[in-house]
Image (tube, helix red, strand yellow):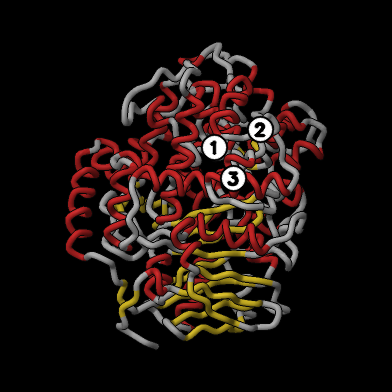
Amino acid sequence: MSEGISHSYSDAQILYVSLTTGEIRKETIPDDLYRNYLGGRGLGVKILYDRLPPSIDPLSPDNLLIFSVGPSTATSVPTAGRFTVVTKSPQTGTVFDSHCGGYFGAQLRRAGYAAIVFEGKSQRPVYLWIHDDLVELRDASEVWGHDTAKATDMLLDLTDSKAQVSCIGPAGENLVRMAAIINDKHRAAGRGGVGAVMGSKHLKAVVVRGTKTVAVADKERLSEVVTRSRRLIKKNAVTNKSLPVYGTAVLVNIINEYGMLPTHNFQEGTFNDAEGVSGEKLLERLSVRTYNCFGCPIGCGRISRVHGKEVGGPEYETIWSFGPECGINDLEWITEANHQCNLLGLDTISVGSTIGCAMELTERGNLDSSLRFGDTTGLIKVIEDIAYRRGLGSDLADGSRRLAEKYGAPELAMHVKGLEIPAYDPRGAQGHALGYATSNRGGCHLRSYLIGPEILANPVLLDRDKTTGKADLVILYQNLSAAMDSMVVCRFTNFAWTPDMYAELLSAGTGLDITGKEFLEIGERIYNLERLFNNREGFTTEDDKLPARFSQPLPEGNSRNRVSHSDELLPEYYRLRGWDENGRPTKATLDRLNLCT
């Protein structure tokens, strides 16, 4: 098994797995891909762009599914245990990358791999077993049909108790467009339906046991830079106090106070019982303990006790989607709903938002259902019906855009490019709104998290209502995020670190001589390549739009009478991006970034 052998990232291999033929081959990362795209998101997007023809059905055998880690993974760099899943999304039709914490990524890197590229479709359920140099497809017929917790336990019994499992649940098996991939039983690569792509290939799981030592270029220098980076994390109020104590749910009261907590399917921006579902209340009533992902000094993870059992979470976005979004203030029920989604393998953001959309469709008479804002009756069964595509659940399983279109009110789906918008009403923060509109993967708060400067005063407080300078800032955050996702490290480090710090950590670990400016340019290259992918799939400037609801003023709260001005900012954003008026990168931009089409 080559146990104990030391390897560097430049020696790491890409696994190509044909699920159709069973053939497995290994290739070393080409130097130009390594230098220009790093790993994680960048490497996955580059492979997808080069190897996937246009107009492929995301749920067809022709789609690719890519698991990838980065040059910092499993090193001493803080938070470097994450991994990325890249594919063409069945929910949006865009290029898509979904990210997950826990311990799986570190095991994959320790096994000696930078990425796994799945091609084709197996005739029967299978899982991939990796133990260092040993790589084989195994029958998963007995595991198929089980939830993610049961499947994980079964696979560990079949392989190695020290291995890590990433698997799908019934939602992925039934091709639910909101299906997630779950590891550690409650960490999710959640968004975009990546679990449905896995299910469409009859791939139940990837199980990895990695025992090799990860080598770094300059151990002494990396140790010094890591010490400084940890010191910055400990000095920052968000990463040293708020997240460790309350987890991401600390945001509930904050965002509600600003009048930006979407309520009743984004009809309002304040929830009358935000305190009852807040991070403070979660800590007081349900929290059992915290936990850290691999190599993480922050420790935002929560374990809660509900109905006599210990479960993971819930996170801020989940509390919102099953809480205020649906008019629900029952924290125990929200926690139970989150647990059910983890077992079934579902994205909580999209599921809760789609249920909220269905509630408004019912309220307005477009849909005949029992779904009502504020009422939890039967909702756990509805979530199960989504995973198994039963009854109305089959319509909900395709997400809010398709649901609202089917029932004659497309304007009631709160999405961008088919992906449900998360828990920050864009009318309350102009930069964040533009980030939603221009996100390459659809409605996403993590492409450009301007909640930091516009709401949390990190690194400085900016006027959330002003549009001046926001296009430039959105681009900066988008480029930085793309580079971070390719390194691969947690987004929360962005509260404490600058681009120069990321570059220092990367340089010390890899031996690549990268400055902060070059780090951002790598992110810019990746973002533009994603844009080229979407352009090739037919996406245009018309898709860089927010729902019409956000042009209507919020009725109450501290964001009362505000509207989004993202449409007004698009021309400036395109110009600063080096894109033409149709949102396509110009030849000059492509040449500067060494991108060819």
Residue nearer the viewer, 588 or 498: 588
**Residue type pointed to by label 3:** Leu
Q: CA separation, marks 2 and 3?
A: 12 Å
Q: Residue at x 55, y 34 (%)?
A: 577
State whether residue 51 appears in this view. yes
Q: Which residue is mark 2?
A: 580
State whether residue 291 appears in this view. no
**Relative image position of residue 27 (x, y in whole percent):** 52, 76
Q: Which mark is residue 422?
A: 1
Q: Residue at x 34, y 43 (%)?
A: 499
**Residue type pointed to by label 1:** Pro
**Relative image position of residue 188 (x, y in whole percent):** 49, 56
Q: Callout 2: 10 Å neighbours few (<14), some, many (20+)?
A: few
Q: Which residue is mark 3?
A: 590
**Image check: 44 left or right of 288?**
right
Q: CA separation, marks 1 and 2?
A: 29 Å
Are the two marked residues, 1 and 3, in contact with CB atoms closer than 8 angstroms? no
Which tag, 1 or 2, sits closer to the chain's start? 1
Q: Is residue 420 above or below residue 59?
A: above
**Relative image position of residue 55 (x, y in whole percent):** 77, 54
Q: Callout 3: 10 Å neighbours few (<14), some, many (20+)?
A: some
Which tag, 1 or 3, sits closer to the chain's start? 1
Q: Residue at x 36, y 36 (%)?
A: 250
Q: Is residue 266 above or below residue 247?
A: above
Residue nearer the viewer, 60 or 583: 583
**Relative image position of residue 447 (x, y in whole percent):** 50, 41
Classify mark 3: helix, strand or loop: helix
Q: CA separation, marks 1 and 3?
A: 31 Å
